Structures are given as C-alpha cells and as structure tokens.
Image (cartoon, grey):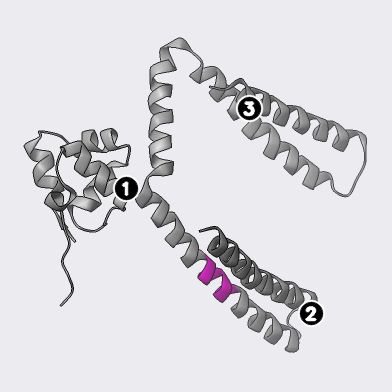
Amino acid sequence: MKNNVERIRKEKGLSQEELAKRLRVSRQTISSIETGKYNPSLDLAFAIADFFNKKIEDIFIYERSK
Amino acid sequence: MKKSYLWCGLSFIGIGCVLIGATIIFDTRLQSLLYGFAGALIGPGAVMAGKYFYWIMPENAERYKEKLDHESIEIHDERNEGLRNKAGRYAFLLSLFVISTSIVVFSILGELEVIENTRIIIMYLGALFLFQIVSLSVFHRHLQKKC
C-alpha cells in the first residue's frame, strides 16, 4: 500500500517526532509507515486522515495485486 | 510516582533482610540459595526506593511526566505490539526446536553413558514440550472464542 504521509507531513511543516506525539505512536511507526515498511491499522489510518483533515483514500492508496 | 512503588521496594528490602537473618540464625543446606534470594530482593528493592525518591523531587516532575507519556506510547504503539507478538512466535518455535533437540541429545548421551540418570531429564523435557503444545492450543481456542 502506498501513502502520502511523508509529503503531507512535510507540507504541514511537522517532524516525524511531532506527528508521532500528536498521534500517540512511536516515531519509528511514523517512519515505517512513510517508507512503506508498515501498513497501519484502520484505527491509526483514520487517525492520520483525521489529523490531516483529509479523506483516508487521499492518504493511503491501496494497490490491488494483479 | 505512586507511593505503592516505594512500599513495594521497602517490602522487598524487608523480606530480603528477613531472609539474611534467617540464613544466619538457622544452619541450612539452602544457605547459598537464600543469600541469593535475599540479594535478588534487596538490590531491586533499593533501586525502587531510590527511583521513588528521585522522581518525586519537584525539579524532576516535568521529566517524570514526559517519561510516563513516552513509556505509555511505547507500550501501546501498534507496530511495537505487532513486533512483540511476532518475536514471541519466533521464540516459541525456537524453544520447541531446542527442547526437541535436547531430548534427542540427552537420549544419546544417556545411551553412551556420558551422563547418568538422563531419564528424569528426558521425561522433564518431554513434559515441557507437551505443555507448550497444549498451552498453545488452549490459548488459541480461548482467543478464538473471545475475538
């Protein structure tokens, strides 16, 4: 699954540490999400979307396997 | 910091001191073991009491709040939880492998008379192996009903 977390975070001028604190997750979790190593749970995905005031599909892009 | 943390530390120190006293008064074969237990209680007890007095100091209040917050995030972080579960699964599989290999190794060493009385060790390892398999199945069924 691709995502735009890093781009949107940078647009908002936030560091990974700050975003992690706001979402109450570890900085490593944010880093892993941004690099695509970790797909967040629905809860966290919605929390991220709510925090950025965007729709979940604007942030997370599901790639169907061929 | 909760006062119960201090009381817990002081209790550890108290029980450790009682154990040392009992070891000195009563001549027993378990002397070294009791000294070990006493040390294992007094050491952490002193650390707990020390931590309590350190963190209740007014100048450390803000840092303590941050520390608690950080600990809470680390514990409840969903990625960390997933990694802990994964690590537990690997450790479980590895322990099954080590136990089953140990049963074979002890059986061979017993047959070759390198180690005497291997039967009790093999029986214990066999029981431990079964216990792990059964407990896995029990927990799995319990969680299936619950979730």
Against B131, is B80 above or below?
Answer: above
Query: Circle 3 sits on which residue?
Result: B46
Mark 1 residue element: helix
Number of numbered discs = 3
Against A47, is B132 above or below?
Answer: below
Q: Quadrant of residue B28?
A: top right
Q: Earlier in the sequence, mark 2 or mark 3?
A: 3
Task: Identify the main secondary structure in magenta.
Answer: helix
Q: Nearer the viewer, residue B15 or B17?
A: B15
Circle number at residue B119: 2
Question: Which residue does the image show at 73% across and 43% down from the upper left?
Answer: B36
Q: Nearer the viewer, residue B24 or B55?
A: B55
Question: Which residue does the image show at 26% across and 57% down from the upper left?
Answer: A39
Against A42, is A16 above or below?
Answer: above
The chain containing the residue under callout 1 comes to: A
Question: Which residue does the image show at 88% across and 49% down from the upper left?
Answer: B29
Q: Any magenta on residue B96?
A: yes
Numbered disc in front, either 1 or 3: 1
Query: Circle 1 sits on which residue?
Result: A43
Numbered disc in front, either 1 or 2: 1
Span colored in magenta: B92-98
Q: Position of residue B139 (x, y in %)?
A: 60, 63
Q: Position of residue B106 (x, y in %)?
A: 69, 80
